Image (cartoon, helix red, strand yellow):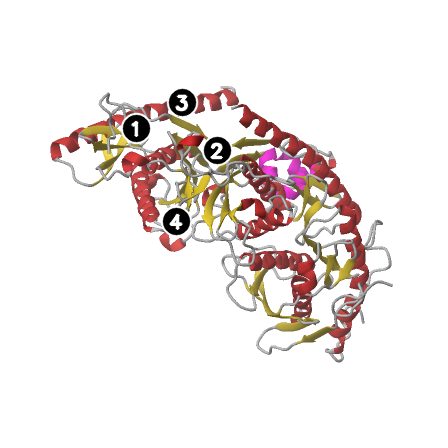
Amino acid sequence: MEFVNPEGLRLDGRRATEMRQFRAEIGVVSRADGSAVFEMGNTKVIAAVYGPREVQNKSQQINDKAVVRCEYSMANFSTGDRMRKPKGDRRSTEISLVIRQTMEACILTNLMPRSQIDIFVQVLQADGGTRSACINAATLALADAGIPMRDLVTSCSAGYLNSTALLDLNYVEDSAGGPDVTVGFLPKLDKVTLLQMDAKLPQDTFKNVMELAIEGCKAVANYIRDILMENTKRLECRRGV
Amino acid sequence: MAVTGGSDLSSEMEVDAFRRLFPLRFHERHLLESIRPDGRSLGKARDTTIALGAVTSANGSALTKIGCTTMLAAVKLEVMTPTQESPDEGCIAVDFHMPPICSPAVRPGRPSEVAPVVAKQLSDVILSSGMINLKDLSLVSGKAAWMAYLDIYCLDADGSLFDAALLSAVAAFSHLQIPVVSLSDEGRIVLVPEGNGGGKFEKEPVNKEKRKLKLCTLPFSLTCALHKNYILADPTSEEESIMETQLTVVLDSSGLLVSLNKPGGSVFAHTSVIQDCVALARQRLKEVKLILNEAISDMDVD
Amino acid sequence: MEEKRGDGRNANQLRPLACTRGILNRSHGSASWIQGETKVLAAVYGPKAGTKKNENPEKACIEVIWKPKTGQTGKPERECEMILKKTLQSICLLTVHPNTTTSIIIQVVQDDGALLPCAINAACAALVDAGIPLKHLAVAICCCLSESGRVLLDPNKLEEQSMKGFVYLVFPNSVLSALPEGSSQLGGPPVQHGIITSVTHGRMSVDDYLLCVERGRAATEKLSVFLRRSLQTQIPGDNSKAGS
């Protein structure tokens, strides 16, 4: 199948290094401590953060840092075919773990000992790149909740199809069976915290694809920063500072 | 400083602290003035918005907000073989989900107590209101019919969940676009791809005219919290937690009572209270119908 | 005056009632309640030390477990549990035993219509048997509405399914207070005219609903007399109960 036509356009009309449209909104869940919606094209994710709060299960309490927990689930109308059991399958357990580890790495957990931070992400529409969208939404929600973080971790995926490196794969490109590289990136520290890839890729091409994904992360980071700045200004305005 | 007594304490305290420490007295003080903490009068519902077509991966969907309470409903259609007893009827399956994002009270791993109850009540109301004639969901008698899966996700739980869920369900069904299907040679139902201009396709579609579901009558509901002699329409979750008695009235667009649900509570509903609640629900029905019609006509313009 | 119903009763006639208390010796209180062919068993355990989940330092916690006749607990059972729990919460004096949990287990033995009202009556009798402090008793009844607008009381399963709609109603039993007449009430309609719980099924006009309420209220007189009598006869020498 042809994923990139001779003019260099992809199936949805994007160029190889073009991302989909983002849209983000902060403070969408009134009763959460922090929440955000993040959209990347047709992928739409909502995240909510509760905490730092009392540890629910006392045996999990850690005396010198906070416990971070994460739950990922998909709405059963989010994919093409209706899902029977949208929760508790191996895929969502894996993604929950990936998100948790990524977020835990950038939260300053040692500042909130003996407490618990819950991150919940719900996929409302899935069109490829849910993993990245979830991480971006979770970052925004954590920032909205005012949880101290080292940096704003952002994520983006890239792939390699028809001997072209493609940024931000959608569902059709993702399910083509080619390599899919997901990167989680700390823009200020210029460090990679998450790197996942399936399928095979020659080493030198891999480097290019990863570089591309990192560029994507930077673009997301700029956008997220703008959103947060705007939100802060609004808050400032409301306080009358 | 010595604490001299409850009333003196309250005058010195900040409003926020008073609200948290003495929620009942805080609300009763408001009720005396016939106003609620969010500035509404007792019988007024919160601002309501409906956005149709919020989920592109579903056949019909709606995002509904009543104040902060947010519901996302989506209908997905699948072809099924009808049962022997009712060969020319389709089926509707209703489910209501409360993922842990919606409220600090819902913890993962522990299924919410409210969700299955709301799901059951929604399914009862939708089926018994006669809103959808199940025969309209039939494709080929005895062979194929639509199975409509309605899934409602609560994204933000701030009181009156049933009202918001029912409204989003009704809106999702009014937005439902039934895909065109045709009967293949092997007698199986296949989807006719979108944008296939009539004559090109060799098989005649089975349901060319029935792209929209005919909704006979629309049910709308209003939940009221009862406290002493006060009736508060559309309570928030804070009000619900303080005033334990709730009464939900569901009326359909012709004014018939579809459900009147009052599960216990310390306030007893006398006939006059029931009549007052029904009157409030009637008024609310008119408002909501207008909002829904506006949303539908906005959609048609697009 | 009107045509008879399928089982030969007239519209306002209830099915034969039977109530036995203390049938389970391991539970703190138990009762079986029979209305015609519908039979429900209720057992009460408690008040016992509150489990961590339900603990409330100010109030007692009530927990209801509904066991269907066959199969697993699904959504309809969860709904019954919730309605029963909220109904019982409103008749119990929860502040007497703070920090405790009282469990009520309902076992459906036979379902032939009016199941939830039957379970509420059984639970109420079992709570009395267990000596849980109550504000007052509650009596539940099912009213069925026919296509012609006739109200039939206490329908069986066949009537429930074939009729236009039905209403489950729970009324408080009048309080026989030791306080002087009128001191507990500040005007308004008498307490026993208020509805504790209402659940409806099917479409009906508001007037039809109010008619059901009126008929149901009239019939609860009979039910409460029966309930009180069956609560008294089984405790010889116990005169402390209300209604003696």
Task: Tell me the mark number nearer the camera, choosing from 1 and 2.
Answer: 1
Do tags 3 and 4 sit on the same chain? Answer: no
In primary-sequence order, the first of circles 4 and 2 is: 2
Q: CA distance from mark 3 to mark 1?
A: 34 Å
| Circle 2 Cα neighbour tier, 10 Å, few/some/many (<14 / 14–19 / ≥20) | some
Vertical placement of residue B107 versus A210, above or below: below
Question: In the rendered structure, which amino acid carries the disc numbered 3?
Answer: Met
Could you say which disc has been placed on residue B186 in the image? 4
- Pointer 1 chain: A
Provide the secondary structure element on which disc 3 rests: helix
Q: CA distance from mark 1 to mark 4?
A: 33 Å
Callout in the foreground (1, 4): 4
Which residue was labeled with disc 2? B54
CA gap, disc 4 to disc 2?
36 Å
Magenta-colored span: B7-30
C184 and C92: which one is in front? C92
Mark 3–mark 1 CB contact (< 8 Å): no
Compute the Cα span from label 3 to label 4.
60 Å
Secondary structure of residue under mark 2: loop
Q: Amino acid at mark 1?
A: Leu
Q: Where A180 falls versus C65 (above or below)? A: above
User: SS of the residue at dot 4?
Assistant: loop
Chain identifier of the residue bearing label 4 in the image: B
Secondary element at tag 1: loop
- Tag nearer the camera, 3 or 1: 1
Q: Total label count?
A: 4
Is there one chain holding both mark 2 and mark 3?
Answer: no
Report which quarter residue C96 is drawn in: bottom right
